[in-house]
Image (tube, grey):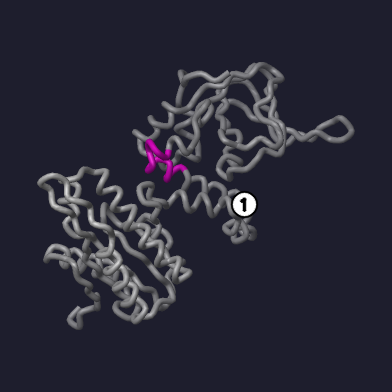
Amino acid sequence: MAAPLGVDPSPIQKAELFSTLLPKEIEFVIARSGILQLRKGGHLFSPGEKAEHFYMLVKGGIRVYKPRSDGGDDEMARFTPGDAIGDFDFARGAAYDAYADATEDSELIMFPGYGLSMEDFALEEPHAISRILLSAIVMVTGRIKSTQKEFVKNMSWVQELHRRAYEDPGTGLWKQSFLTDEINRILEDPTALIMLKPDRFKILVDSRGHGAGDEAMVRIAALLRNVTRRTGRGWPLRFKSNEVGVLVNKCTLAQAEKIASDLHNSIAALPPVPAKGAVPAFLFTAAVAYAVWPLDEASWENLFRGTYDLLMDTWKAGGNTIVHYKKRADK
């Protein structure tokens, strides 16, 4: 039976999946774990069950085995106190392919706790869950021989972990951390960076509430995803609170100009937020900045920073315009 956590939490703190968490995030994990007690001979899991939890053995012992047709079995592993059990299957979102039984009365920490799921946690603590999923990717690929790693990266469950780890929960866009971690892999000559920032967004939030701001960001995110759907490539991104954009590889300067113009027009075409009492209708406009690597700047880092700075300067000057970042001759 599962019960609220009431034992030494050090096994959780030592678990590989939680190695990148901050102290407060560890507390979050501990609070949402549970205790599982098994009598000798009790099943921890069986073949075909989806690995929706993993376990850290506190007391007792666990034996993992596969039965044979002759009535015997092949033992796969034995676990003693301090060991993590099933973390590899949990990280992959896989189904177990063996039995796990208690060799004596045993006590385990279970994560997530009984009745909880990773989806529940993502709503409460998205940053912590992102770090857990990233650790899962590192752990999974690290346990597989290097000759198999490229094959593993293309497996659907790894791609799903990768997507969820970098997904902004509010809009479904890719986070800026995706660029930080993956830019060397995805950068192709030429690659366009198009950034935009909605004008007067604070007025919208102050007059209509954060819900109106969230709804507006969801609409803007849909416009960005339309860009990548039409081109068949690229990544829609959320950089900071309401600074968003797209990265499109194999994109010429003329194509980047067209994307920037289309986005600028699409923002202006969003349905206005209707007037409410003395508050007038809110009309959408945005500042848009774009650049193409390596045409406009040979250094990706400088191009990103320069495009962002130009976007912010344009927005502060009134916005509602499109600007092209190019490296200055005196730099």
Q: Quadrant of residue 154?
A: bottom right
24 is higher (above) or lower (below) than 212: above
Q: Is residue 40 above or below residue 300?
A: above
Check the image and name the residue furthest to the right.
70
Q: Is residue 6 left or right of residue 206?
A: right
Q: Amino acid at mark 1?
A: Ile
Element assignment for label 1: loop
Counting the numbered discs, the total is: 1
**Residue in front for this viewpoint, 260 or 4:** 260
- Residue at the spot 85% in from the left edge and 30% down from the top edge: 72
Is 221 part of what is drawn in magenta? Answer: no
Q: Is residue 119 visible?
A: yes
Instruction: Say whether residue 204 is left or right of residue 17.
Output: left
For the question of whether residue 64 can be seen, the reply is no
Residue nearest the observer in this picture, 260 or 109: 260
Residue range of the region highlighted in magenta in the rendering: 122-132
Q: What is the chief secondary structure element of the magenta stretch?
A: helix
Residue at (67% x, 18% y) in the render: 104
Task: Tell me the quarter of the image containing the C terminus.
Answer: bottom left
Residue 67 position in % (x across, y down): 80, 33
Identify the residue at image location x=47%, y=38%: 119
Viewer-proximal residue among 138 and 226:
226
- Residue 311 appears at what percent x and percent y? 21, 66
Q: Which residue is mark 1?
A: 144
The image quadrant of residue 282 is bottom left
Q: Position of residue 167 (x, y in %)?
A: 41, 51
